[in-house]
Amino acid sequence: MHPLLLKIGPIPIHTYGFMIAIGFIFAMMLNRRLAVKAGLDPERAVDLTFWCVVIGFAGCRLLFVLTMWRTYLADPISIFKVWEGGLVFFGGPLAAVPFGLWYTRKFKMPFWRAMDCMIPGLVVGHFFGRFGCLGAGCCYGKPTDMPWGVRLQSELVEPALRGIPLHPTQLYEAASLFILLLGLLWVFKRRLFDGQVSLTYFMAYPIIRSIIEIYRGDTIRGFVIDGVLSTSQFISIFVFAIALTALLIRLKKVQGHTLKR
């Protein structure tokens, strides 16, 4: 765990913020490339990506603050200390997707096609972000006897879990996201309809996240049913159900158009 990556004079470079910045750069590059392949205006696509990242980041932070509102009520200034960690990922899409819908309508872009170009970049950014989580010491796992357990001393780790081997859930999720990225790029090349990539993501990631949650040990992330159903698992159920329904509807439309031909 290295929350402070380095210092340039008096300026501290935090691992968490650095990894998010790296993820943002690679996400922008990938999204631009996919936009060109999809026949979209690359400059407009990059602009959409930028604002979705900004708004999505704010959404991630807001959802985390809401789950920890008592803590932040006592120290409101700490809400802005994002370099110390503290994001709930699902807050990002919940904030960015409505904005993306508004943006694409305003500039007459095909919403689902734009989403298909953006989602792989989102996965890239999330992938790098999980390494930032490991560096900061947040989003940690439960105690484990496995040889790959990691020991964290961060103040973000509950005192009883500091210094003992924990499941590296940050790395579990990073590995899962990398595999998911490869799968989404494969779907992108072979997609039958606009929205297939993004809806595949919104079905696959909730499953990944729900499994990872089983090994998470940070209770501050919140539970709908204590010790049984975490906040993220609860949200995952609805995200998966909505994505599956939307996928079936769009697939039915594609099949209908094919039959008419």
Image (tube, rainbow, N blue to C red):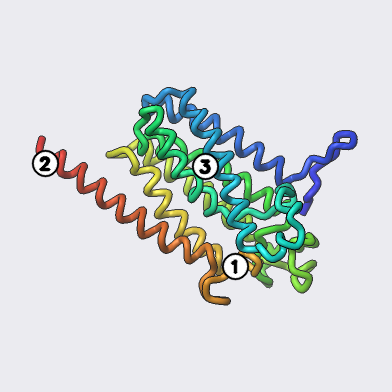
The residue that label 3 is drawn on is: 122
The residue that label 2 is drawn on is: 259
Q: Crowding near pointer 2: few (<14 within 10 Å), some, many (20+)?
A: few
Q: Secondary structure at mark 1?
A: loop
Q: Position of residue 169 (x, y in %)?
A: 62, 60
Q: CA distance from mark 1 to mark 2?
A: 48 Å
The residue that label 1 is drawn on is: 222
Q: Nearer the viewer, mark 1 or mark 2?
A: 1
Q: Is residue 67 above or below residue 12?
A: below
Q: Crowding near pointer 3: few (<14 within 10 Å), some, many (20+)?
A: many
Sequence order check, earlier mark of 2 and 3: 3
Sequence order check, earlier mark of 3 and 1: 3
Q: Nearer the viewer, mark 3 or mark 1?
A: 1
The answer to the question of whether label 3 and label 1 lie on touching residues, with beta carbons closer than 8 A, is: no
Q: Amino acid at mark 1?
A: Gly
Is residue 198 found left or right of 58 in the rendered image?
left
Residue at 79% of width from left, 43% of height from top?
Answer: 5
